[in-house]
Amino acid sequence: MRILHLSDALHPPVTGGTEVFIDRLLAAQLQLPSPPQVLWAAHGDPGGPSGPVEPGADRLLLPPVVPADRSRRLAMEARQLPGFEGLLDGFRPQVLHLHSWSDRCGLSHVLAARARGIRVVMTVHAPGFTCLQGSLRFRRRRPCDGRIDDRRCTDCRLVNGGMPAPLAALLACQHGWPLTSDSPGRLAHVLTARPLTAAFRRGWQRLLPEVAAFHVLARWSAEVLQRNGVAADRLHLVRSAGPAPLPPRPRSPRADGPMRLVWWGRCAEVKGVHLLVEAIRQLPPQLPLQLDLWGPGWDSAYGRRLQRRLGADPRVRHRGCLAPAELLPRLAGYDLGLLPSLWPETGPLTLLEAFAAGLPVAGSDLGGIAEWISDHGGGVLLPPTVSAWRLFLGAMARGERPLPAPARPPGRTVATLAEELRPLYGP
């Protein structure tokens, strides 16, 4: 069997959760009995290089897509797919496995594959597959059920863009006539926001009959897809897998001074890092706690705002990035991991890394974090609010709450994941 994996980016140099997942999956697929031929492709950025990532690599960087007009772009279509159709004809995959949903990895690619009789499988890695804002948070305030609705989703997009809520609700009820989504000017873009949302919905609806199997990593994700028309018999829940666990070791919380807290991952608003920063800033400075922050993304606008907010507070430190080999031993030296995500994570990989390191966690009572902790223990679930985290961290630092015991690793390996995905590729 020949399997072509397609995503928005390759690993390396991109090291997000999706890219790490695919990287590990490919390695495991190549170790299966009767291993398939696998190739991982992604379109590059305009002006960037293309070709193999390195000599003999199992991944290929294609030329950039040629963007279509705005409405087709939101339907995840491209005007041209340089190198992709030639790749289909040269590699001749039996399966196209999609891991992203964009014009770089979207409907045009699926239709090109289906025209050649290629089976399509899609793994849903993030909320953005059914959410134009990418976070499943209505007006950035509360969780959304994920059902694509032209009026509601347009309202949400306009509010997220800075428009007052009453005006956004009014504009979401009209279609922008006589303007079109390609009319020039900011006013036209605002007035035609609803037709663009409709284009996104139609792109999703065109995708549904072309995908043989949807792979989801969490129960909540399956529920969202069903609300958007995916039949239950094409939904397959196959949980992710984390790294091999470290040997168990006795823990001595606070043995060497303050309670040592850690957050790690990509610095982005949906990860909720600001909840921790604000919560600690509101606690008395004499409380014995120390929070270390690890990971990329601090040069973003959000990251720079956070750094300014941190100021000279010695209790919170950005420590840079960790090499993969360093991560688990470093995590094992902390007392508690913090995962305050605002969106419903599908894995998340960070939680599985905590399990492998023997690190207990406190996480948001949302999505995949809530599902894993409810199923395996090893943590505390909190609402994703500053006040909830302030009260919790204050009680922990004062010794009023015991540290949760770490979870036992769930015992899933990437080899198990690869075996469980094999039936989705067909006979």
Image (cartoon, helix red, strand yellow):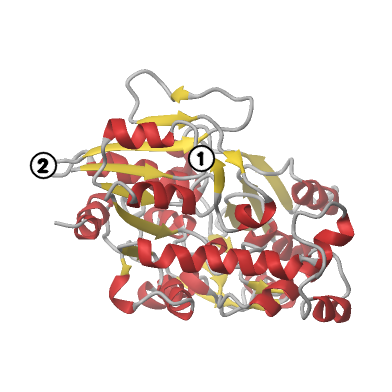
Residue 17 vs residue 2, the one in the foreground: 2
Find residue 335 and name its label.
none
| Other-residue count near label 1 (Cα within 10 Å), few / some / many at <14 / 14–19 / ≥20 | many
In which quadrant will I find the N terminus? top left
- Whole-percent x and y of residue 225? 45, 73
- Whole-percent x and y of residue 222? 41, 74
- Whole-percent x and y of residue 78? 56, 45
Q: Give the secondary structure at mark 2.
A: loop
Above or below: residue 195 compared with residue 37 = below
Which amino acid, mark 1?
Ala
| Other-residue count near label 2 (Cα within 10 Å), few / some / many at <14 / 14–19 / ≥20 | few
Question: Which quadrant of the view contains residue 124?
Answer: bottom left
Q: Residue furthest left?
A: 34
Residue 88 vs residue 356, the one in the foreground: 88
Question: Which quadrant of the view contains residue 209?
Answer: bottom left
Find residue 9 and name its label.
1
In the shown orientation, is residue 46 left or right of residue 409?
right
Residue 344 vs residue 332, the one in the foreground: 344
In the shown orientation, is residue 24 left or right of residue 258?
left
Q: Give the secondary structure at mark 1.
A: loop
Looking at the image, tell me whether mark 1 or mark 2 is earlier in sequence order: 1
Q: Residue at x 16, y 41 (%)?
A: 35
Which amino acid, mark 2?
Ser
- Whole-percent x and y of residue 139? 74, 74
Q: Which residue is mark 2?
A: 34
